[in-house]
Structures are given as structure tokens and as C-alpha cells.
Amino acid sequence: MVVDVARVSSEPPEFRPARHPLRGLLGDRWAMTGGAIVLFFIVLAVAAPLLSSIEGHDPYTYDTKALNDSGQPLGFGGGIGGSHWFGVEPVTGRDLFAVVVHGARTSLLVGFAATVMAVLIGVLAGLTAGYFGGWYDQVMSRIIDVLFGFPWLVFVIAIGAIAPAGFPKQLLVILVIGLFGWPSIARVVRSQTLALKRRTFVVASAALGAGPAHQLRRQYLPNLWSTIIVYATITVPGMIGAEAALSFLGVGVPPPTPAWGRSIGEAVSWVQTDPMFLVFPGAALFLVTFAFNLFGDGLRDALDPRTRR
């Protein structure tokens, strides 16, 4: 058989268009599962007052009738029943379902607010350091290195001790976590900015006389959005975990405000006699952080040009 080499070589290669990022994300079952769980917890947090009112309890009322003389919940599974869907807290008798759903508000609010703050500071610091370079880049890089090694937990405990009594502790937690959470995204954005500086369209824009504001707004930020969105998504669970850790140590959101971390910390001493006190807030914290990580990984893969074919 004779092959027409000229004909074969003249045929254009098969063109396979890149998948749209949304199609790639929708096709990832794990990412969609994580997104559905995240959406579920957001709805749970928004509807927390309605859900707790349907059950008939709020997270602040003590129900000593549901406890025995030693402060342990009466009945099966820590008092689980028609009146208390998740049972009650030992000693206080507070409804655990109301505590968990209202605790979702605390964790998600702190997680989202601290992430927004960290992303804004990190993007500004990383973008300007990578763009301007020189002594400014050197100073910013050293600040980032110092913050990476700074014992922020000790600092938070000290700040909590000297903060004014009237200062909202929830706002203090957001500020501290956000201020110590931006160095990692700043380092990523800086490296991406340095790579963009060598791209042809950026060099051509500078040669045509475009100023820094125009370049940062029109050339750099549009090419950094995917990185910023993905990093913000995978930062949220870390912020939620940080708030839970602070509440676990007793320096986070003060009682009686519901918080998963504080409930887990209090449940540790009751795990032998009332394991459900630990199971429900612990499962909620695990599910929401795991779901954010699943969704963030899927979003990263969908927005990565190397995986969109």
C-alpha cells in the first residue's frame, strides 16, 4: 500500500477545544459533593434561628430538667429525643442541636471574614512586591518570612488578655486570624506576578507607555483571578479550623456564643460518659472543612489550563 505523504502532511491536526472551567467543575463529582455540603452548611447557618425555633429551643436556655443530679443528660445518647434532636449539653442542659446550628454561624462568619481580610492584604502585598521589585520586594519578603515563623497563637492569647472588655471578641478573632493569614497568599501572588512580568503582552504594554495602575488593573489582575479564587477557597477551612482551635483553648469567641471549637473542648472531659456531646460538633467541623477542601481542589483543577483538555 502506497501512502500519499504529501496528503498526510497537509492534513491539519485534530483540534480539541479546551473545556470550559464550569464544565470541568460540574464534571467533578467530588468537587460537586464538597460544594453541596458547603451550600448545606451555609443554608444551615442562615436558617439557624428558624431551625432551632422549629425544634423549640434556643442555644442560650438552660434545661436542668434534662439532667440528673450529677449533671449528666438523661436518656439515650446524651438526651436525644423528640424534644432535643441532638441531646443536651452536660451541666448546662443547653440544646445541642441549637448550639451546633448556631455554631455554624460563628465558624462560617469568622472563616469567610478572615479569609476576605487575608486575601485582600495578601494580594496587595504580593502584587506590589512582584511588580515593583527592588528594595520594596526585599522588605516585603522579609516581613513575610518573619510572619511565617511568628508564634501567632501566643500573640492571640496575649491580645485577648489585654483587649478592652467592651471590644467584641468575635471581631478580635477575625482581625488576628486575618492579619496572620495573608503571608502565604502574598508569596503565591508574588511568584505569579514575577512570572507575568516576562510575558510578551506585559512587556509590550510597558513599551507602549502603560502606567503601573493600568498594568496592574488590566494585565496582572485578570491573569491572577483564578489563582486568587482558588487560594481563597482553600483558605476558608484553615480559617475555620483556626477559630475552632482558639475556641477550644478558651481564647476565641466567648461563651455563651455557640462555637464548635469550644463545644469540642468542653466535650473532651465528657467523652466517656456522653460521647454524643463530642460527635455532633466534631462531625460538623470535620464535614465543613473537608467539603471546602474538596471543592477547592476541584476548582483548582477546573481553572488550571493544563487539566482543561
Image (spheres, rainbow, N blue to C red):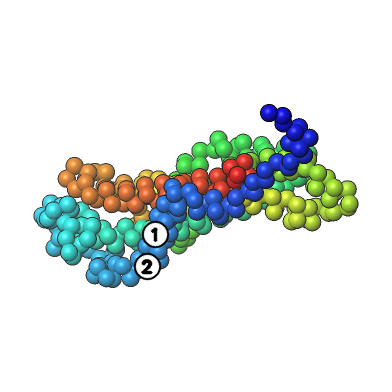
Look at label 1 and name its amino acid: Phe
Give the residue at the far front of this rendering.
Answer: 1
**Mark 2 or mark 1: whose residue is earlier in sequence:** 1
Cβ atoms under marks 2 and 1 closer than 8 Å: no
Above or below 1: residue 141? below
Q: Nearer the viewer, residue 261 or 84?
A: 84
Q: Residue at x 64, y 52 (%)?
A: 225
User: Any mark on residue 156, and which?
Assistant: none
Q: Quadrant of the N terminus?
A: top right
Q: Nearer the viewer, residue 151 or 40?
A: 40
How far, Cα to Cα, is label 2 from label 1? 10 Å
Please indicate whether residue 150 sits to the left or right of residue 186 in the image.
left
Give the residue at the far top of this rendering.
Answer: 1
* Residue marked by disc 2: 47
Residue 221 x/y as whole percent: 70, 53
Residue 194 x/y as whole percent: 73, 40
Can residue 163 be seen?
Answer: no
* Residue marked by disc 1: 40
Q: Residue at x 80, y 47 (%)?
A: 202
